[in-house]
């Protein structure tokens, strides 16, 4: 009997035409676990995809959140990242699931996100875009054994480019928001990379402050990219 990739409970397959024709993740998750993945819906920030449902009115200006307004008012960062789109909200269930995926090396868990990730990409981005996963440092890659952003990018079944390298620093998850914002650029461009006029979609697991994505986008724009957007699995 097939079991759920998260809770290992039995999968009860009730094959209906709706399920067979849908893009659901029912083949790898039980209904209880699947219901805990909260897809982003309703009104969101036009830049970072932050849901407005639980955001106080004073933290938004028309269709943009206050955080993105601050980015846009900074001459260095204005329009560096055109937009981010995320699939799920970063709730406790997804936090634990990503911990299994990233830190415990359960590579197979990425498959539960496949259809929703592909659907979100198709809805918001052009398939002709250059797909660039956010890289890990060599030290972090050795520690984990794989780059979770690249695994997510591979779910799209599109050509992947890896023009960036990353400096090894303290884990971003351990830093406060203000510390992340003060971090110097941790990315470098590989030699002989041509990006003039390219439209790029960065891939990463979580959008939190947007600092990491903007640092990567800054380097790519300096290398000639026409535009840089991002697709992340979760919006923190």
Image (tube, grey):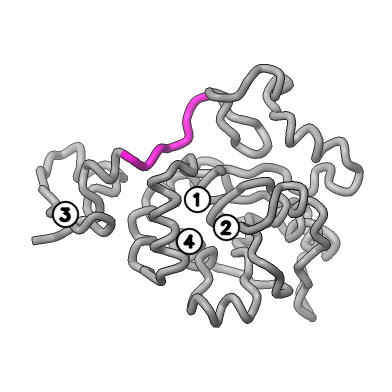
- Provide the secondary structure element on which disc 4 rests: helix
Q: Main secondary structure of the magenta part?
A: loop
Tag 1 residue? 233
- Provide the secondary structure element on which disc 1 rests: strand
* Mark 2 vs 1: CB contact within 8 A: yes
Q: Nearer the viewer, residue 181 or 121?
A: 181
Labels 2, 3: front one: 3
Quarter-wise, where is residue 64 in the image?
top right
Q: Position of residue 216 (x, y in %)?
A: 73, 60
23 with respect to 91 (left or right): left
CA distance for labels 4 and 1: 8 Å
Q: Which residues are magenta?
A: 36-42
Q: Residue furthest top?
A: 57
* Mark 2 vs 4: CB contact within 8 A: yes
* Mark 3 vs 1: CB contact within 8 A: no
Tag 2 residue? 204
Q: Is residue 213 above or below residue 67?
A: below
84 with respect to 104 (left or right): right
- Provide the secondary structure element on which disc 3 rests: loop
Tag 3 residue? 9
Q: Is residue 49 above or below residue 25?
A: above
Question: Could you tell me if residue 165 is visible in this image?
Answer: no
36 with respect to 92 (left or right): left
Q: Residues within 10 Å of mark 2 (few under 14, many from 20)?
A: many
* Marks 2 and 3, the one that precedes in the sequence: 3
- Tell me, for residue 152, which label it has, or none: 4
Q: Residues within 10 Å of mark 3 (few under 14, many from 20)?
A: some
Q: Nearer the viewer, residue 153 or 157?
A: 153
């Amino acid at each position: 009997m097939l079991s759920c990739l998260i809770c290992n409970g039995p999968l009860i397959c009730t094959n209906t035409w709706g399920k067979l024709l849908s893009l659901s993740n029912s083949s790898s998750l039980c209904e209880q676990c699947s219901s805990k993945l909260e897809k982003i819906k309703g009104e969101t920030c036009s830049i970072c995809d932050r849901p407005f449902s639980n955001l106080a009115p004073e933290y938004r200006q028309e269709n943009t959140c206050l955080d993105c307004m601050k980015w846009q008012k900074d001459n260095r960062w204005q329009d560096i990242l055109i937009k981010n789109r995320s699939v799920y909200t970063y709730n406790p269930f997804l936090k634990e699931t990503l911990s299994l995926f990233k830190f415990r090396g359960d590579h197979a868990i990425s498959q539960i996100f496949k259809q929703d990730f592909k659907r979100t990409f198709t809805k918001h981005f052009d398939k002709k875009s250059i797909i660039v996963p956010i890289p890990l440092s060599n030290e972090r890659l050795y520690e984990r054994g794989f780059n979770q952003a690249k695994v997510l990018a591979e779910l799209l079944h599109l050509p992947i480019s890896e023009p960036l390298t990353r400096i090894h620093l303290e884990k971003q998850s351990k830093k406060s928001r203000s510390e992340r914002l003060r971090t110097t650029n941790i990315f470098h461009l590989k030699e002989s990379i041509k990006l003039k006029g390219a439209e790029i979609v960065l891939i990463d697991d979580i959008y939190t402050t947007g600092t990491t994505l903007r640092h990567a986008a800054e380097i790519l724009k300096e290398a000639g990219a026409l535009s840089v957007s991002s697709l992340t699995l979760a919006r923190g």
